[in-house]
Amino acid sequence: MSIPDSPFPSPSSTPRFGAHALSTSDRRLLRLAQRQPRTWLGRRLALILRRLVLRNRTEPIDAEVEGLRMRVHVNDNVSERKFLFMPGFCDPAERNYVETHLTPDGVFLDIGANAGIYTLTAARNYRRMAGKGYVLAVEANPTMQSRLGFNVAVNSFEPQVRLAPIALSDSTGEVEFTVADGNLGESGLNTPGANKLRVPCKTLDDLLRDAGVTQVDGMKIDVEGMEDQILSPFFREADRSLFPAFIVIEDSAYRWRTDLMSLLTAAGYRKHAAHKMNLILVLEHPT
């Protein structure tokens, strides 16, 4: 399966952006929540404000977050809801590192793109640099592909984002994917649940080859404990020229079946920073 140049459909078939806007009073509460400092008290106040805005609400919310337009589905995805009301608590250091370490003509891999928090962050910076750089967003869940596509379109980021509507694993073919109940961000190949579907699957090496990628600025990977199954064969077999200059990875070592950190260290990565849930790894001697 090749990666299309313009994978996202026009959002014309869905309500226009703004159709789910908050009331004036709720917009004020949202802005206040978004401005809370990254402290214990700031978090508590943001949660209280969020509860006030979301009382009895079942519809999504159209709003701006850090200057990005998003249609946020608040009832079934924790990461969307958290980013809308508490962006300062959503990987600020990791996203800042991504923004400041992209190159005009490189590629950023967002593996497990979800609604696009990292994708939109990187795409905005690629557009500012006005080169050929883009985000290759990997997302297997059809529901999240649609939401991601809408968010990309309403920000006019189509030239800076390409979608790989697949799962990644240690083999190419088709796999069983579980759509999680309650929190779509926890969907994946290695998660429990009754809502199963079959999705296409590739190895990371095959994906990059099929997409024609020759330079990888960086990678964010968060796939519910499957990181080792994707990355171990890649770093054993791929050409070093494809190694990302940096990796933002969810620290799920307790779920990994292989010693992924030792493999990454042997490949030339060192730990640049450790945050609450993620590690930032940097390639010491990129090609």
Image (spheres, grey):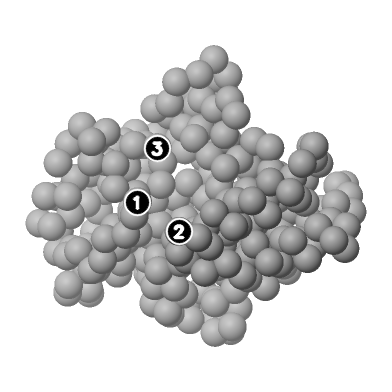
What amino acid is found at the position of numbered circle 3 in the picture?
Glu
**Eyeballing the image, is 23 above or below 97?**
above
Name the residue tied to disc 1.
277
Q: Residues within 10 Å of mark 3 (few under 14, many from 20)?
A: some
Residue at x-position 68% and y-position 37% = 75
Percent x, y for residue 227? 32, 42
Q: Residues within 10 Å of mark 1 (few under 14, many from 20)?
A: few
Percent x, y for residue 107? 45, 67
Q: Residues within 10 Å of mark 2 (few under 14, many from 20)?
A: few
Looking at the image, is mark 2 or mark 1 earlier in the sequence? 2
Percent x, y for residue 148? 65, 51
Residue at x-position 48% and y-position 46% = 112
* Disc 1/disc 3 C-alpha distance (Å): 12 Å
What amino acid is found at the position of numbered circle 1 in the picture?
Met
Question: Which quadrant of the structure image shows residue 209?
Answer: bottom left
Residue at x-position 57% and y-position 42% = 78
What amino acid is found at the position of numbered circle 2 in the picture?
Trp
Left or right, 256 with respect to 70, comes to left
Looking at the image, is mark 3 or mark 2 earlier in the sequence? 2
Q: Nearer the viewer, mark 2 or mark 1?
A: 2
Name the residue tied to disc 2.
40
Secondary structure of the residue carrying numbered label 1: loop
Secondary structure of the residue carrying numbered label 3: loop
